[in-house]
Amino acid sequence: MLKNVIRSIAVLAVAAVLLSSCGIRRKKYDNPIAKDTQQPDKVLFDKAVNDIEHSRFEIARLLLQNLINTYDTSEYLAKAKLAIADAWFREGGAHGLAQAEAEYKDFILFYPAMEEAAEAQEKVCDIHYKQMEKADRDPMHGLRAESECKELILQFPNSKFAPAAQQKLRDIQEVLAEAEFRVGTLYLKKGSYPAASNRYQALTDQFPLYSRADEALWQMAEAYHRMGDKFENQQAGAYTKIVKDYPLSSHAEDAKAQLVAMKRTVPEADPVQISRMKYEQENHTKRRLVSKSLGVFGGRPDMTQAAKAGSPPMQGLRPTIPVSVPASAQPTLGTNDVTISQPGGANSAVDAGPEVRSPAAGAAPADTAAPGAAGATTTPATATTPAPGTVPGTENPITTPQNHTGTPKQQLKAQQESIRKQQRDMKKAQDQQKKVQAKKDQELKAAAAVAKKDNKKKQDEQKQQDDQKKQ
């Protein structure tokens, strides 16, 4: 009997899946047009909406694209573009959700003032929110979901979707904080106390609404305690934060006792935090037994422990530097920036210095000594010294680089003028060579013509002589 019941239930489930896949099951569309008219563009839109509701997504997208291409002045263009994105969103799958995100982004870009723009941003956040994985897996979708939900809250703060986005943001940050907590715990167990304290410090500073933030502070204090007396202030700071910001924590009394033992001031509990923690305890969501037992096999994270109140921090998790790193070794903003300075100007050391290759640079040439010195050789006054940049025995001077003074623009201009001059001289020499060669070719051609004429004349004379002999 039991087997027959199980078999019947399985058959009904398979039938329901098949019917839904065939488009018989109808899911109402969220953004229909209530206007009753028989305009062609409105007829196309209504038919596409009907196809979306019956899961005929490809047909619906073709109709909507036809509407956009045919009726470019239609009042339903924005609705049609949003409906295309909704069709991809309902189709689901990795490809469908990626296409839906691109279409929603385009809609927000083209129609940012419409009410549906906030809904489009909410759908983008929901795309990544639904694909989030557990804390010990790839956090890509969690980080993207956090970014998109923050964008919704900042860009559309008065939207009806903003409160739900805040709760989603608390859920997302619960998962991200849990990942950091697990990493910190691993470091603590391995004995890497600076790394563990650094993880816990960043976690408690940037995710104060995390459900296990008090536990993270307690373990952070333990890590600082293991690092030695040098970090006693950080240890006391962790205990102080537990007492002040998490007064209903199970570690609150132990933290007070530790502060008394360390002869530190025990702070008063923050009444706002007391109210927040009481609200969390009263509205705590218990995880269902089925979800708890089957959650091991699933990929969805457990977000039942996420906070239900409080403003989620809008600044994401950023890496921090462990306190064990000396201050002199820590990079500070502005000191590690790379700057490029262009040489030149009145204060340039290169321009203000003497010419390196000039004889007046302060050092005498190797073959010349100061007058009156032993072994000095004198050069006759009539001797001529080749001008700088020329090679003796050549008519055309060959320019060599010089340390010109002036601004870089002037130096560049001088170099360009020198290059152009060399090119003009080279072209002139080539033209002259071409003229000489053309003249030689002409002379050779004329000489060949004269030789040919003389040869023909000799042949004619020889022929006449041969004819006379025959006669």
Image (spheres, grey):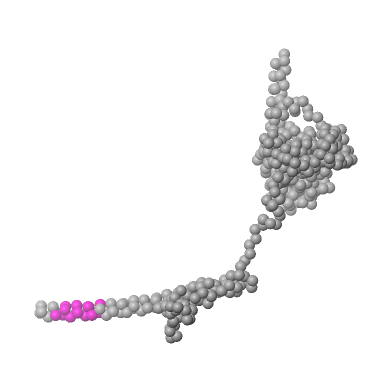
Let me know if residue 183 is in the magenta part: no
Q: Picture coordinates of residue 464 (x, y %)?
A: 16, 80
Q: Nearer the viewer, residue 304 or 348?
A: 348
**x 63%, y 62%: residue:** 340
Q: Please name the predominant secondary structure of the magenta segment in the image.
A: helix
Instruction: Identify whether 345 is placed above or below 120.
Output: below
Question: What residue span does the magenta drawing correspond to?
Answer: 452-465
Say which quarter of the image contains residue 382: bottom left
Q: Quadrant of the C terminus?
A: bottom left
Number of numbered tags placed on the structure image:
0
Asked whether residue 458 is in view, the answer is: yes
Asked whether residue 86 is in view, the answer is: no
Q: Picture coordinates of residue 446 (x, y %)?
A: 30, 79
Q: Picture coordinates of residue 19 (x, y %)?
A: 70, 29
**x 74%, y 43%: residue:** 230
> Among all residues in the image, which is located at the extreme top?
1
Q: Quadrant of the N terminus?
A: top right
Say which quarter of the image contains residue 244: top right
Q: Nearer the viewer, residue 85 or 119?
A: 119
Q: Report the side of 385 relative to 59 (left or right).
A: left
